[in-house]
Image (cartoon, coloured by chain):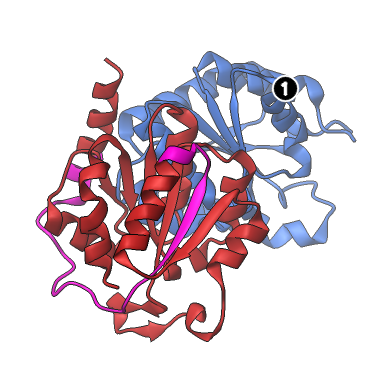
Chain colours: A blue, B red
């Protein structure tokens, strides 16, 4: 499977440097190495979800507990989380660091991913969620740190779109 | 059995717990008994109260966490039962007030009125302890046993579809949220 192990590790290490101590996740191809890293890390609380929207409640509870968290999800999982984002994270000013694998964009071969790819950025904009791309090795650490900082200071969701350029080796 | 009487029967025990409720009647009735800084009322996002309680219990394993859920909310997020069961924090108590109704929007019957068995779903999801109670005495005893069991427990409390006269209280959502977090941080000092 040509998901980049090296770049996944870079992302995971950057999360650790931000003192992320809880990760919620629902597996998807691009996220497998990130989830395995969290699973292998005895200092990380990994919460495997049935549906991504649960992760909004998980991150809120972690925030109340004083624990920094991150969410690993596919863009379709983001789409499945919208009411939680609006009716919990936005309504109650909950910081969310959402790492979203950006399927269905340039280079996508799976037809079933393409419709979600078309609407991901418009929906993020409509929800007024600041979003940035993780696309090159040299900016990964900085962008993750900056996104986490912004989520905490603004008390709102911030999204990082994990791109094919970073996650996929072919 | 009235939900308000159930809440009243365990109210003193809630003092040293972290409490998360769903929206609507549960939130209004608990507030009518007296708000405390360790109570958080999730006044929307139906289904996510149990997820919030799960994270609190995982991050703060020494704390007893009580979630007051409802049949309508739980039916929107049945996957939460499987997620809670997967991690089964011992000091998480998941209480579901089942009035078989979406009461606050006019009393439309939920699927528990036509045979859906939430205790059965909890059991099949892997929740280690569960019970259904139909009396206030039974409710109080079940909560007390859950507190002593040190095992994740789901309690289905069958209650009448009766709620408070008003649902909106003078506690604003953000005030509640910031107070709740500050309270938890104060426990760590």
Q: What secondary structure is found at the residue carrying circle 1?
A: helix
Q: Is residue B183 above or below residue B152?
A: above
Q: Quadrant of residue A117?
A: bottom right
Tell me which segment is drawn in magenta: B148-177
Residue A158 spot, x, y in % from top left: 45, 38
In the displayed orientation, state which residue is furthest to the left.
Answer: B170
Apparent side of residue A10 relative to residue A59 in the rendered image (left or right): right
Q: Is residue B52 visible?
A: no
Closer to the camera, A58 or A131? A58
Would residue A48 be found to the left or right of residue A94 on screen? right
User: Which image quarter holds the C terminus of chain B?
Assistant: top left
Q: Position of residue B99 (x, y in %)?
A: 37, 75
Determine if residue A84 is in view.
Answer: yes
In magenta segment, residue A119: no
B159 is within the stretch colored magenta: yes
**Rendered view: B27 above or below B152:** below
Residue A50: x percent and y percent?
64, 52
Q: Which image quarter: residue B87? A: top right
Neighbours of disc 1 within 10 Å: few (<14), some (14-19), many (20+): few
The residue shown at (41%, 56%) is B95
Residue B155, horizontal then vertical, whole percent: 45, 58
Residue at (36, 56) in percent of width and height = A87
Chain of the residue on which disc 1 is drawn: A
A164 relative position to B167: left or right: right
Report the front residue among A4 and B186: B186
Q: How many marks?
A: 1
Classify residue A89 as left or right of residue B33: right
Q: Kindly identify which residue carries mark 1.
A: A40
């Amino acid at each position: 499977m040509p998901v980049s192990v090296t770049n996944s590790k870079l992302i995971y290490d950057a999360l650790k440097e931000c003192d992320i101590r809880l990760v919620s996740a629902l597996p998807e191809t691009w996220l497998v190495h990130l989830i395995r890293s969290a699973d292998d890390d005895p200092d990380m609380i990994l919460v495997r979800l049935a549906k991504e929207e649960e992760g909004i409640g998980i991150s809120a509870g972690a925030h109340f507990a004083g624990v920094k968290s991150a969410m690993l999800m596919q863009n379709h999982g983001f789409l499945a989380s919208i009411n939680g984002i609006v009716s919990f994270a936005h309504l109650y000013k909950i910081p969310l660091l959402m790492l979203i694998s950006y399927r269905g964009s340039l280079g996508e071969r799976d037809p079933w991913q393409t419709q979600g790819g078309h609407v991901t950025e418009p929906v993020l904009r409509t929800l007024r969620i600041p979003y940035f791309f993780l696309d090159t090795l040299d900016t990964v650490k900085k962008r993750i740190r900056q996104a986490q900082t912004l989520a905490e200071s603004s008390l709102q969701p911030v999204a990082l779109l994990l791109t094919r350029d970073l996650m996929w080796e072919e | 059995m009235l939900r308000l009487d159930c809440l009243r029967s365990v109210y003193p025990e809630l003092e040293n717990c972290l409490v998360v409720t769903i929206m609507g009647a549960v939130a209004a009735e608990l507030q009518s008994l007296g708000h405390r800084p360790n109570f958080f009322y999730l006044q929307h996002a139906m289904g996510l109260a149990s997820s919030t309680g799960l994270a609190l219990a995982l991050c703060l394993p020494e704390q007893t966490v009580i979630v007051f859920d409802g049949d309508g909310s739980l039916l929107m997020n049945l996957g939460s039962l499987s997620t809670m069961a997967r991690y089964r924090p011992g000091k998480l108590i998941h209480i579901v007030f089942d009035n078989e109704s979406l009461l606050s929007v006019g009393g439309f019957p939920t699927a528990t009125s036509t045979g859906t068995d939430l205790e059965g779903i909890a059991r099949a999801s892997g929740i280690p302890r569960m019970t259904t109670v139909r009396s206030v005495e039974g409710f109080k005893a079940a909560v007390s046993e859950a507190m002593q069991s040190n095992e994740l427990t789901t309690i289905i409390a069958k209650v009448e579809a009766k709620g408070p006269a008003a649902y909106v209280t003078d506690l604003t959502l953000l005030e509640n949220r910031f107070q709740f977090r500050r309270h938890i941080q104060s426990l760590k000092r």
